[in-house]
Image (cartoon, grey):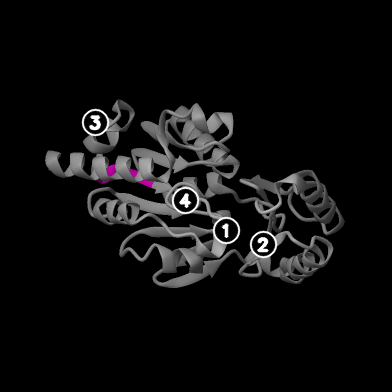
Amino acid sequence: MALPIALQPLVTHARRAAFVVDFDGSLAPIVDDPSSARALPAALDALRRLVPLLGRVGVVSGRPAAFLMAEVPIAGIELVGLYGLEWAVDGEIVGDERVRLWLDTIAAVADEAAAELPGVLVERKGGVSVTLHYRAEPERAEEVRAYALDLSRRHHLDVPQPGRMAIELRPPVPVDKGTAVTKMIGGSRVAAFAGDDVGDLPAFDALVRLVHDGTLAHGVRVGVRSSEAPPRILGADVVVDGPSGLAALLQDLALTISERD
């Protein structure tokens, strides 16, 4: 397919360009069991090709950094987990020190949720955060959301983060995909971020802000369409159809840059 005009600046300024992507719903299709999610081979191949072509290529996800290191084994790619609470640096995981005070609380919250919400999948993310998945029982959405809000209030956690048939509880540390992407793309002239869900919107907002203040010459928001995507994802600068559409876009970007070089 032809590369969208909005992405042409990444070709023109490839050495000073950054492309950052979300994992679940973007590189990998959404599945019932989060532990079985896998990035599409075509997407991994495209990222592998882009690493030597762009100034920076990265993944910013709600997943733990250890998961990303195992599932995106690409030399030179930058991996950020838990919305910026964990960074993979030289093969090691560097966590945000501010989280330490909250580890016992997060463990207690996970135990309480598992006991009080039978049938809801309680995903413990490296002991740093916990996600409650109700995809197997969507009719319980309001119940799970209300319980998560109650947990967050009683344990003084951050406001629960909604996702696709899930809601996440994490420490009240001021990081999100917006702060993570801002840090990751520092020094870039052009940057793009691809995502599919509510948790990706702070990254979209960060690109808009960085262009507005002159830090970036161009910022490109790439929305990954699904039946569950919020409206702002579908109003992005470029919209692709699911993870397969994003993989094709990344492949086309790599090919276009290679042909230009």
Q: Which numbered tag is attached to residue 203? A: none
Q: Is residue 187 visible?
A: no
Instruction: Please state which amino acid type lies under the numbered disc 1.
Output: Leu
Whichever of labels 4 and 3 marks the residue nearer the N terminus, that label is: 3
Q: Are marks 4 and 3 in contact (CB under 8 Å)?
A: no
User: Where does label 3 land, which residue?
Assistant: 2
Main secondary-structure element of the magenta-colored stretch: strand
* Nearest to N terminus: mark 1 or mark 4: 4
Distance from the alpha carbon under mark 3 to that under mark 2 = 40 Å
The residue tagged 4 is: 29
- Nearest the camera: 68 or 33? 33
Tell me residue 172's x, y (percent). Answer: 72, 54
Using a 10 Å C-alpha cutoff, classify the residue at mark 1 as few (fewer than 14 neighbours), some (14 to 19) or many (20 or more). Answer: many
Disc 2 marks which residue?
129
Are dots 1 and 2 in contact, CB under 8 Å?
A: yes
Disc 3 to disc 1, C-alpha distance: 34 Å
| Distance of label 1 from label 2 (alpha carbons) | 8 Å
Look at the picture and state if 149 lies above or below 206.
below
Q: Residues within 10 Å of mark 3 (few under 14, many from 20)?
A: few
Quadrant for the N terminus in the image = top left
- Indicate the quadrant containing the C terminus: top left, top right, bottom left or bottom right: top left
Q: Does the magenta run of residues contain 17? A: yes
Residue marked by disc 1: 82
Between circles 1 and 4, the one closer to the viewer is: 4
Q: Secondary structure at mark 2?
A: strand
Q: Earlier in the sequence, mark 3 or mark 2?
A: 3
Which range of residues does the magenta coloring cover?
Answer: 15-19
Q: Mark 3: which secondary structure?
A: loop
Residue at image coords 73%, 49%: 160
